[in-house]
Amino acid sequence: MNIRTMVEKVLPPILPVLVAGVAAEIAVRAHWVKPYLVPAPSSVIAALFNNWRELGSATWTTADAALTGFAMSAITGVLLAIALSSSPWVQRALYPYAVFFQTVPIIAVAPLIVIWFGLPRTPIVSAFIVSIFPVIANTLTGLLSTDPALRDLFRLYDAKRMPTLFKLQLPFALPHMFTGLRIAGGLAVIGAIVGEFINGQGIGGYIDVSRQRYLVDKVFAGLLMASLIGVALFITINLLSRLALRHWHASESRA
Amino acid sequence: MNSVLVPQAGTGISVGVRGVRKVFPGGIAAVDSIDLDVKPGEFIALLGPSGCGKSTLLRMIAGLETPDSGSIDLNAGRISFVFQDAHLLPWRNALNNVALPLELMGMDRAKRLSEAATALKLVGLDDALDRYPAALSGGMRMRVSLARALVTNPALLLLDEPFAALDEITRHELDEELHKLWSNRRMTVMFVTHSIIEATFLAERAIVFTRRPARVILDHTLHLPARRTPSLRTDTQFSTQMRILFEALEQGY
């Protein structure tokens, strides 16, 4: 990458942050806004470094919960989508409940999660619940959009259920599946933090405690770390998608 | 060489269509009381206006759809189907696409890949084995699709307007190659098209259908030399034959 492309590619996304950061810094230093409402970016960075040990272990806890919940919903979601795609009958019987499941607000279910699974496991379960639906919905769409002619071809050669699933339907569903996983990744982090607001662990707990003490700079530092987890997950999924689809899917085959 | 691809004379099977009728949901008849006898190793063109139901007939012969009444008699033998577009698996390279039918039939890897390579050579693509469909032109993709149909050494080859989406030059080229392949192998071929030139150039016998519901309006044996060369298309004999099909098509419209 030469300097020119560096500037063209890296500068645009950094520019807004820079502008907003400088504006916030000026606004706080000029006493236009109260520092206990909006922290100066410099004090957020200071909070990040000064509380690194505490924040680092909190980030690790949250990442662990979000990732575990995400992995669970990725596996269960794909399996459920396969089950749903197996027959219109199963689909009619179960899909409405999957939709219903998704519309229940996680915050309202959280107390039940605590009762059923205990406080330590609340973030994982909550991450799982909020992130499974996009996996199911997108994978199902992918599984059901298999090229009808190719389905005919497989029928013509008497392909059984399993070869049809693994050699035709699942590969066809991959681009959709990755879309679902990308959405699920971000949601899993949200779910984990909601759970941590209740059990006081991880970044959720860290933010909650800082809020009670009006330490807005620490709240922001926590927020930054939380979105870092989401971004890391997103980038990882994108990389996997790229690896899996680069040869054949238009979404990943740009030079 | 112990390959299934070694051409064997007279490998085609006969096809008997008796009083076949097919009604689509909604009550529109696609195909109505069709009788047709295809001899083993014959090359038949099914010619008719777009959407007349000739594709439905082909799908019924392939066993992809069942007739509402009447029957279709086939002798035992492998059937291959070539669709309107190439319909390849985009995540597989040419070689693995062609090997797919053998893979589904349970042939071991080394053997099916060598058969697939032979089939690709047959359609002139031996230098594109590891290319993905996205990196192939429309004509090349269709060749891969054709190789995939040939790799099982079918006794009956069904083609549903296979070259309709290609430009005319490529289409003529593929017509010529298909005819050569058939001359060497003598499988039974049923070729659906709405192009009179294509039907005349390829077939020994052309069946002309009416508008929906498809009925046979003409069953004509083409009086043309067995060897079909590109220059035949400009021959007066060729245009006389085309005219016969054209008039039947007009009449059924």
Image (cartoon, grey):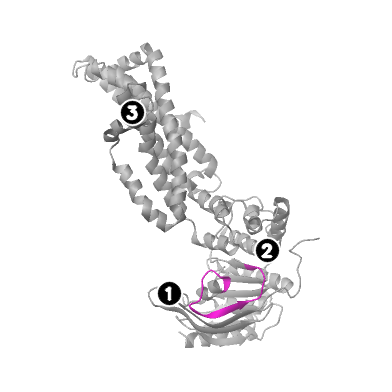
**Residue A226 appears in the figure:** yes
Quick check: A7 left or right of B168? left
Q: Which residues are magenta?
A: B61-79
Task: Assign a secondary structure to mark 2.
Answer: loop
Closest to the camera, between mark 1 and mark 3, is: 3
Q: Which residue has dot 2 on it?
A: B152
Give the residue at x 33% y 28%. A195
Q: Position of residue B71 (x, y in %)?
A: 55, 80
Q: Secondary structure at mark 3?
A: helix
Residue A129: x %, y % from top left = 36, 37
Quadrant where the C terminus of chain B is found in the figure = bottom left
Identify the residue position indicated by label 3 in the image: A195
Left or right position of B20 against A140: right
Q: Residue at x 79, y 61 (%)?
A: B2
The label shown at residue A189 is none
Cα gap from disc 2 to disc 1, whole angstroms: 32 Å
Q: Would residue A157 be found to the left or right of residue A136 on screen?
A: right
- Quarter holding residue B166: bottom right
Q: Amino acid at mark 2?
A: Thr
Residue B70 highlighted magenta (yes or no): yes
Circle 2/circle 3 CB separation < 8 Å? no
Q: Chain of mark 1?
A: B
Neighbour class for label 2 at 10 Å: few (<14), some, many (≥20)?
A: many
Q: Inspect the magenta stretch and tell me whether residue B75 lies in it.
A: yes
Mark 1 = which residue?
A: B24
Asked which secondary structure carries label 1, the reply is loop
Q: Position of residue A176 (x, y in %)?
A: 44, 47
Q: Earlier in the sequence, mark 2 or mark 1?
A: 1
